Structures are given as structure tokens and as C-alpha cells.
Image (cartoon, rainbow, N blue to C red):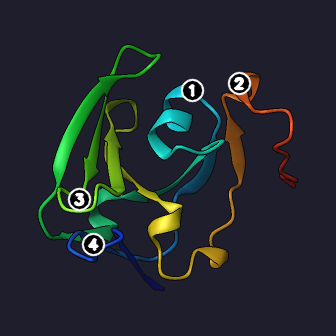
Amino acid sequence: MRRSASCSCGELSIVAEGEPVKISACHCRACQRRTGSAFGVAVFFNKEQVEISGVSSGYVRSGDSGQSIEFHFCPTCGSTVFWKPEFRKGLVAVALGCFSEPATLVPTQGVYEETRLGWVSFDFD
């Protein structure tokens, strides 16, 4: 399976080959701020599965583990398209909403449930 993801203006894009390693809905405050929403959804692929096209700007922050997370966003439209968490070496996380067909990608786990907003619920089987 080949999946395409891009920023709002289309200048920064990713093509991912094969199935994701995992899909996580993150409820941490940092993801809430980054997305401007109640949570962020990361679709993780092995770095060998993704091909990145276009120019990105980066932002690095420390995670709760003390390890860095390097976010990449489009310098034109500002969309965060992908990130590389140091604690998951070899993986690239792609923002679910950037995929051309996001409905086919369903979160399999929730993380940082302690900061999940009360009105958000998922049915993880």
C-alpha cells in the first residue's frame, strides 16, 4: 500500500510504503498545543518506508522522557507534517490529518490518557 500525505499548501509531502508500525492518539498538552485540537494522531512508519519531498522548517523540543522530538512543518503554510522522536529511533511519525485518505488509518492506542479531555473517547479493541 502506498499512502500520500502533504501540508495544506502541498509544498511539503510524504509518500509512505506499506503498513504503519502503529497509530497513536496522543492527549498530551504539547500535542494539544501543537495541533490546536484535543489530541494529535501519529501514524508511525519505519524511516525506510517514507520518502519526503519539499522543504521543511524544524522545531525541536524535549519530551517527558528527556529525549528530543524533532517536528517538521511547512515554512509556507505552517502545517506540521511529520516528526522524529528520539525515543523511537528509526521511526517517522506522520500527522494523520495530512494523509489524502485519513479514514483508512485508525488509532490503535491512546497515550497520555491522564490529560485526555473528558469529552474525547475512543473504542480501542
Q: Which residue is mark 2?
A: 115
Query: Which residue is found at the position 74% from the left and 31% from the top?
Result: 116
Tag 2: Cα neighbours inside 10 Å, few (<14), some, or many (≥20)?
Answer: some
Residue that numbered label 4 is attached to: 13
Is residue 124 visible in the rendered image? The answer is yes
Above or below 48: residue 70: above
Q: Earlier in the sequence, mark 1 or mark 2?
A: 1
Per the model, the C-alpha gap separating discs 3 and 2 is 28 Å
Where, quadrant-wise, is the C terminus in this rendering?
bottom right
Q: Amino acid at mark 3?
A: Cys
Q: CA distance from mark 3 to mark 1?
A: 22 Å
List x then y, in percent, for residue 56: 16, 56
Q: Which amino acid is tagged 2? A: Thr
Question: What is the spatial separation of the Cα atoms under label 3 and label 4, in whole angstroms?
Answer: 9 Å
Q: Secondary structure at mark 4?
A: strand
Residue 99: percent from the left, percent from the top?
47, 74
Give the residue drawn at x 64%, y 78%: 104
